[in-house]
Image: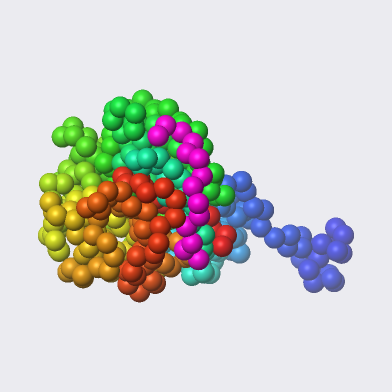
Amino acid sequence: MSGPVANNIFRSSGVVVAAAGGLSWQPVVTASTLSASAGNGYWINTTSNACTITLPGSATAGDQIIFVDYARTWGTNAIIIDSNGLNYQGQPDTFTVDYDTSGQAVNLVYSGATIGWTPSSDIVNALEPVQPPTQKAIFSFGQPSFTNLVNSSGVVAANVTQVGTARGAPAAATYGGDKAIFFGGAKVSDDSTVGITNLVSNSGVVGSDVAKASGVRTVADVAGSTYGGDKAIVYGGYGSTTNTKYNLINNVGVVAADATGAPTGRQGSAGSKFGSAGEAIFAYGTANINISFIVTDQGVPGSDRTGVGTARKYIACASFGGDRCVFAFGSNNSYLAVSNKVSNTGVVASDTSAVGTPRIGVTGTGYGGDKGIIAYGQVSSGKTNVSNLVSNTGVVAADTSGVGTASQAGNSAGYSTSA
């Protein structure tokens, strides 16, 4: 017998075989093609594209290769297996083999020429991480422009001096899971529209103005929402050339160039996330419409859906229950105090007589993980600073005495995952 006995799995005479050393895990693969080798494990990241994987052209029984869905994106961009002339589960190489389930891992073992490569397991990791809910909220800008933070118990704090260009009617949305962005608006000084943004940190600090990028519009009366768990979208706005456009915002707060959506153009609308798939809904707006549309978890606006409830504009929308939202207040040429709940499948309910002072130019958002708050606005006698808490079942509470400067046409968003 030749060779070190330590490498002989029988520890006696017979065939000398190197002791198993485990798979060799390779760097994350982002390319659209991969030539795989036996004895390796591969993290396959298909965030940007599908990946065609070519298996070895020759193999020995017991050869093993593992592929893992690195970013849980195989459901969007699949992997395609090319068995390179060898059988795959008893079928010839002419058969198409793909894996298109997010979170999947495929452990391939070569069994011999008859069956060829076969998965010893092709499991899906069911324990997909769940992003922690947003705990705090921020109201900012408006006419006049101030900032007020909201803690995880729904208590509105006193004014914080406004940072950035004072303006009304911007959009606002949560991005990155724990930060917020304010987009666009009309300057308080001369009512001209802007395309600047202000990012809000996960500690509630409003950043200075960020100049708009090429291709990003200047607009006011625009609505915003989170989508896809950690990204944002702003839709509509004042003017016939901007009210059908939208901008996607990635999970680090970068605003993409203008895109045109399918739904009816609108201004004075509102939006919110809903459900568990990362969708968003926008509804209502000028000229006194009640139609809605849904944005997919990939940021694609859908078509108009039949309107429900009182057609109105300059409304608020606040999330509640972790997967639902409620539209409230607004005007149909009279100040209103009605609300409409949205289910976790995006179904808008008929009117509920809301509690609280009828008003317009109001704004709402989620807080505390599963509750909402609606605040500020214009009432018949002027601006107000009252707020209304929304329970985790969507019940809008009576007015809470206002904190901070009475203001209207501001906006709000959630921030922070720490209570």
| Quarter that holds the N terminus | bottom right
**Eyeballing the image, is 214 above or below 376?**
above
Residue 311 in magenta?
Answer: no
Where does the image place residue 132, in percent across and percent down from the top left?
52, 62
Asked if residue 99 shows in the view, the reply is no
Out of 180 and 274, give the one closest to the viewer.
Answer: 180
Residue 283, image quadrant: bottom left
**Eyeballing the image, is 168 above or below 138?**
above
Report the label total: 0
Residue 107, image quadrant: bottom right
Residue 161 in magenta?
Answer: yes
**Eyeballing the image, is 106 above or below 73?**
below
Where does the image place residue 76, in percent across and percent down from the top left?
37, 53
Residue 343, image quadrant: bottom left
Which secondary structure class fits the magenta region best?
loop
Asked if residue 311 shows in the view, the reply is yes
Residue found 30% across the figure and 57% down from its top? 317
Relative side of 351 to 14, left or right: left
**Eyeballing the image, is 126 above or below 208?**
below
| Quarter that holds the C terminus | bottom right
> What range of the chain is rendered magenta?
153-166
Where does the image place residue 40, in percent across and percent down from the top left?
62, 53
